[in-house]
C-alpha cells in the first residue's frame, strides 16, 4: 500500500469516526430532551416545524430555567397553600366558574412564590415545561376550560375536569416534585 493510499484510508476513517461521534452526540442530546420534556418535546417539534428548531427552543428553555431561582416552600407555606386549595374546591359547588378562575390564580401565585416568572400564559407554559413537562397537558386543558368558561361556553363537568387538571399541577408544584 502506498503512502498516499494509507493517508486516504486514515482520513476517511477519521471522517467516519467524527461523523459517528457527532451523530451519537446529537442522538444523546435528543434523548435527553425527550426524557426531560416528555410529551412537550413532540408538541414543540410540531409547533416549531422540525426537530432542529424544536431542540434549539427546548435548550433555550433549559438555559432560561437554569437562571431562575426556584425555591422550595416551607412546611407552613405548603400548608397554607393546601388550605387555600381546599377552600377553592369547597366553593366549586356554589360557584364552579369562579372556582376554576380562583384555581388558576392560586396556581399562578404558587408559581410566583416558588420563583417562576408568571408573565402570561405562554410564558408560564415555557417555564413550567422544563421541570413539569409531563404535567403541562393538565395545565393546558384546565386553562382552555377557564378561558371558555369566561365566555360561558363550559359545562359543569368540563369545569370539574379543569379543577382536576389544575390540582395535578398544583400538587406537583406544592410538593416540589418534578414530572420527569
Image: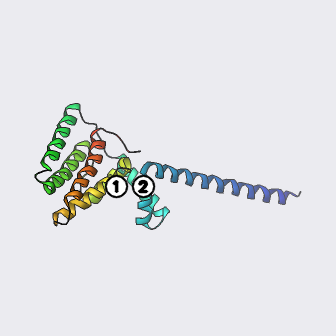
Residue at 19% x, 40% y: name it.
81
- In the picture provided, is 75 more to the left or to the right than 35? left
- In the picture provided, is 62 more to the left or to the right than 165? right
- In the picture provided, is 99 more to the left or to the right than 32? left
Residue furthest right as drawn: 1
Count neighbours of disc 2 (C-alpha within 10 A) and say few if under 14, some if 14 to 19, many if 20 or more: some
For the residues labelled 1 and 2, the Cα–Cα distance comes to 8 Å
Residue situated in front as seen by the camera: 143 or 113 = 143
The residue tagged 2 is 39
Q: Colour mode? A: rainbow
Residue furthest top as drawn: 75
| Any part of residue 23 in sight | yes
Residue situated in front as seen by the camera: 151 or 55 = 151
Residue at 85% x, 57% y: name it.
3
| Any part of residue 126 in sight | no
Residue furthest left as drawn: 94
Mark 1 and mark 2 lie on one chain; the one further toward the N terminus is 2
Residue 26 horizontal/vertical position (percent):
56, 54
Residue 144 horizontal/vertical position (percent):
26, 61
Residue at 38% x, 54% y: name it.
61
Residue 16 in the image: above or below residue 50: above
- In the picture provided, is 65 more to the left or to the right than 55? left
Q: In the rendering, which numbered label is found on residue 25?
A: none
Residue 69 horizontal/vertical position (percent):
30, 42
Quadrant in the picture for the C terminus = top left
Q: In the rendering, which numbered label is found on residue 137?
A: 1
* Numbered disc 1: secondary structure: helix
Residue at 22% x, 50% y: name it.
108
Residue 77 horizontal/vertical position (percent):
19, 35
* Numbered disc 2: secondary structure: helix
Whether the residues at callouts 1 and 2 have beta carbons within 8 Å, the answer is yes
Quadrant in the picture for the N terminus = bottom right
Amino acid at each position: 500500500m502506498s503512502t498516499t493510499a494509507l493517508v486516504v484510508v486514515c482520513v476517511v476513517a477519521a471522517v467516519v469516526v467524527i461523523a459517528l461521534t457527532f451523530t451519537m452526540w446529537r442522538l444523546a442530546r435528543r434523548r435527553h430532551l425527550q426524557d426531560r420534556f416528555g410529551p412537550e418535546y413532540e408538541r414543540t417539534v410540531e409547533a416549531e416545524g422540525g426537530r432542529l428548531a424544536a431542540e434549539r427552543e427546548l435548550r433555550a428553555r433549559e438555559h432560561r430555567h437554569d437562571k431562575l431561582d426556584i425555591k422550595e416552600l416551607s412546611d407552613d407555606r405548603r400548608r397554607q397553600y393546601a388550605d387555600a386549595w381546599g377552600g377553592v374546591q369547597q366553593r366549586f359547588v356554589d360557584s364552579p366558574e369562579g372556582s376554576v378562575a380562583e384555581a388558576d390564580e392560586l396556581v399562578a401565585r404558587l408559581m410566583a412564590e416558588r420563583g417562576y416568572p408568571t408573565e402570561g400564559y405562554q410564558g408560564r407554559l415555557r417555564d413550567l415545561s422544563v421541570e413539569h413537562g409531563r404535567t403541562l397537558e393538565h395545565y393546558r386543558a384546565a386553562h382552555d376550560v377557564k378561558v371558555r368558561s369566561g365566555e360561558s361556553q363550559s359545562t359543569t363537568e368540563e369545569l370539574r375536569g379543569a379543577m382536576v387538571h389544575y390540582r395535578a399541577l398544583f400538587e406537583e408544584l406544592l410538593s416540589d416534585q418534578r414530572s420527569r
